[in-house]
Amino acid sequence: MFRLIPLSLVMINVGGLLALIGFFAYAIDDPTFNLIGFFYGVPILLGGLALKSAELEPVPFSKLTSASEIKLRDLQATPTLNQIRKDVTRYRYGQEAHLDLALEKLGLSPSDDDRPVLKGLQESEIDGAYALTLEFYSPFIKIDAWQEKREKIAKFFGPGIKAEIELDEETEEVNVALIVDRETATTSPA
């Protein structure tokens, strides 16, 4: 639950409230609350505003995950897939985009302007195996480049992962399905 609440919003609200108390205390000549407001409220408020400017919002699920898919995730998902799911579905600070370093290491991010943008994700079952599908908006990197990197993607997010890549030409989205290879995966619960 706390991962869905932006830290910047909490800091802005707490800092703003303390700063208002400080200004009010200054107006009524109460030095104790005045100091609390100015020495704690204003820095917390400024810190919250700074975090807000560096905030990266969570990626939404494009499809509701069913109970059977959650059960399959608990049984088969690798620690890497669980970490990806948890990382992209929470607020992040100080990053340009979700999975930006992974895309760069895979050679799928030639520049900040051409980088694919993670727009959604979904969990599913493919041939009895758990799959986490990452949905990238990728108008600058064509499907051929993604297909060439398929094995590299599987190794990068592996071991025990197969990658399937599909293009939705209508939306220019590239769907990267990271599928647990049940024969080679070493799984552990989330």
Image (spheres, rainbow, N blue to C red):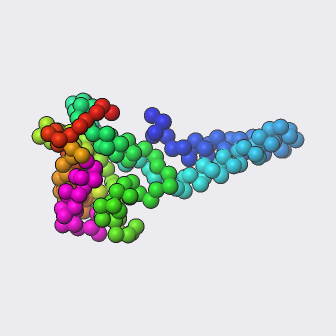
What residue is shown at x 28% (from left), y 50% (from top)? Answer: 157
Residue at the image position 63 percent from the left and 50 percent from the top? 47
- Nearest the viewer among 113 and 21 is 113
Classify residue 141 as left or right of residue 129: right
Q: Residue furthest left?
A: 127
Q: What's the residue at 80%, 42% (across, down)?
A: 35
User: In which image quadrant can residue 99 be found?
Assistant: bottom left
> Picture quarter containing residue 170?
bottom left
Q: Is residue 152 magenta?
A: yes
Horizontal relation, residue 79 to residue 46: left or right: left
Between 179 and 38, the residue placed more toward the observer is 179
Total labels drawn: 0
Q: Tell which residue pokes out farthest to the right in this image.
A: 29
Residue 104 position (above or below residue 81): below
**Res 182 visible:** yes
Q: Position of residue 120 (x, y in %)?
A: 31, 50
Q: Is residue 69 visible?
A: no
Place of residue 23 in the rendered image (x, y in percent of width and height, measured from the top left): 78, 45
State which quarter of the image contains the N terminus.
Answer: top left
Q: Is residue 154 magenta?
A: yes
**What secondary structure characterizes most of the magenta part?**
helix
| Left or right of residue 159: residue 3 | right
Seen in the picture, residue 36 relative to 57 is either above or below; the reply is: above
The image position of residue 43, as x and y in percent, is 69, 49
Question: Residue at the location (43% across, 44% down)?
Answer: 90
Q: Position of residue 89 (x, y in %)?
A: 38, 44
Q: Quadrant of the C terminus?
A: top left
User: In this picture, which residue range is highlighted in magenta?
Assistant: 138-158
